[in-house]
Image: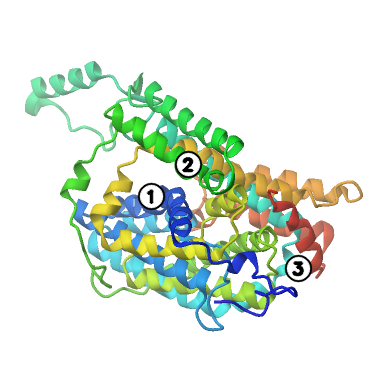
Amino acid sequence: MANSASISPNGAVHPVDEKLPTGKLAALGLQHVLVMYAGAVAVPLIVGRALKLSPEQVAMLISADLFCCGIVTLIQSLGTTQWFGIRLPVMMGVTFASVAPMVAMANNTPGAAGAQLIFGDIIGAGLISILIAPLVSRMLRFFPPVVTGTIIAVIGISLMRIGINWIFGNPFGPTAPSIVNPEHAKWLADTTAAAGAAAPAAPKGLALVATVPNPKYADLTGVGIAALVLVSILLIAKLAKGFVANISVLLGIVIGGVVATTLGLMNFDKVGKAAWFDVVMPFQFGFPVFDPILILTMTLVMIVVMIESTGMFLALGEMTDRKVDRAALTRGLRTDGLGTFIGGIFNTFPYTSFSQNVGLVAVTGVRSRFVCVAGGVILIVLGILPKMAALIESLPTFVLGGAGLVMFGMVAATGIRILGGVDFKNNRFNALVVAVSIGIGMIPLIAPNFKQWMPHNLHPLIESGILLASISAVLLNLFFNGAKDDEEAVKRAAAQADAH
């Protein structure tokens, strides 16, 4: 759907509106899907297990998430009416910023009742976000390059943790670095059994310390395959030309998947058990429950999401050479709210533009929004074909981790390039804004338990390093530099985000 900016004076179609051949669109769209897939399914896995849902219900959450990812991506990239869709190459996915408050709700109210509460709060927050989107879009003067560059850099640094954990294993759970010594666990079990009724009741939360290296963590074979994926991407990007170079990430993932299958590390059991077709239906857990306080909490999360989206939309606009004016920004932010509203109806979660896919635009140089439209169609198909979704889900995380280092690192690099347009020589305050904000943004990553003695009502607001960095950058810039309404300066500095 072209607008007045789609045709240049010489009659050429703007690269954003270029319609590539179907085969290329499908391949490039699939690359976008593969880059975001693990991140897209992570949130329903986390929240579904926190709600103590059955495996079938968790699988349903994943399918619903993929389906809604596709629907909202189509709305954002293709555009619908004058109200929704920024019409840029944007892939929409569940925001990780919403995980902490949803898990807290799930822990307090598990099961279907908790799901009804979560989805009701998401619907309420989505409606409010649609209404306040124009207000957020008028706050550009509070987000000059020194602020947006810092926020995007922190987003990239935060995402790197996900890619690294894909390669080595998560800090907690079955792939944690250490496990309980089996001999110690056996001794405790035998001692308890021998004591019988005479044994005092174990204190609540009693657990043995994990002291033995876990063989599942940082397995050298998996690390080697992740390295192979990374090297393959770099070699293809360096040596190949044209279309092949543009799908370097996809080819790297395919190479890793083939090697993992050859070594017997890729399991297809889930593919065999999954159904061929399943329709995503709304309100699977019953009618949603609306709690005003929890809706307010989720709305605050959505404001943060829209602030993050603002920076990404501006950077993406400069990457694609498409001016992002206030009306376009409002349409994009309004779609964040609409996607969240749709998500609550279809048993899924708040949506935002996926920053790793912004990095993919920088890596490939392909600016056509119809690539993301193709990605949205693929996501919808995956959402209604569980067997196909299971096939992609079967990719070992270390394969995705090798590609994740490239994608997530490119997000951080985008932030650094935006900061490259900031005046540090004549304005020493800008360095303070960046330095302090990045440091504050790292607190939840480095010291995740820093909040343990603070009021629990504050936890959802301070668990996100991205939120803390955003608040810090905005306030410090306001303190040192004031609020200068210089939109062109934002655009000029954001041009540093162009990778070519």
Residue at the image point whose x is 23% and y is 59% from the top: 111
**On the image, numbered disc 1 is attached to which residue?**
42
Question: Residue at coordinates 54% horizontally, 40% vertically from top-left?
Answer: 160
Residue 251 spot, x, y in % from top left: 45, 41
Whether residue 47 is visible: yes
Name the residue nearer the viewer: 239 or 47. Answer: 239
**Quadrant showing the N terminus:** bottom right
Which amino acid, by three-letter code, is at mark 1? Ala
Gap in Å between the C-alphas at discs 1 and 2?
Answer: 10 Å
Identify the residue at image location x=36%, y=20%.
Answer: 211
Query: For the residues carrying marks 2 and 3, which lies nearer the camera in this image?
Result: 2
* Labelled pair 2, 3 in contact (Cβ < 8 Å): no
Distance of label 3 from label 1 (alpha carbons): 34 Å
Mark 3 and mark 1 residues within 8 Å of each other at the beta carbon: no
Residue designated by label 2: 162
Q: Quadrant of residue 446?
A: top right
Q: Amino acid at mark 3?
A: Arg
Q: Callout 2: few (<14), some (14-19), or many (20+) C-alpha neighbours within 10 Å?
A: some
**Circles 1 and 2: CB distance less than 8 Å?**
yes
Left/right placement of residue 488 relative to residue 116 reads: right
- Sequence-wise, the earlier of marks 3 and 1 is 1
Label 1: element kind: helix
Secondary element at image label 3: helix
Number of marks in picture: 3
Q: Which mark is residue 141?
A: 3
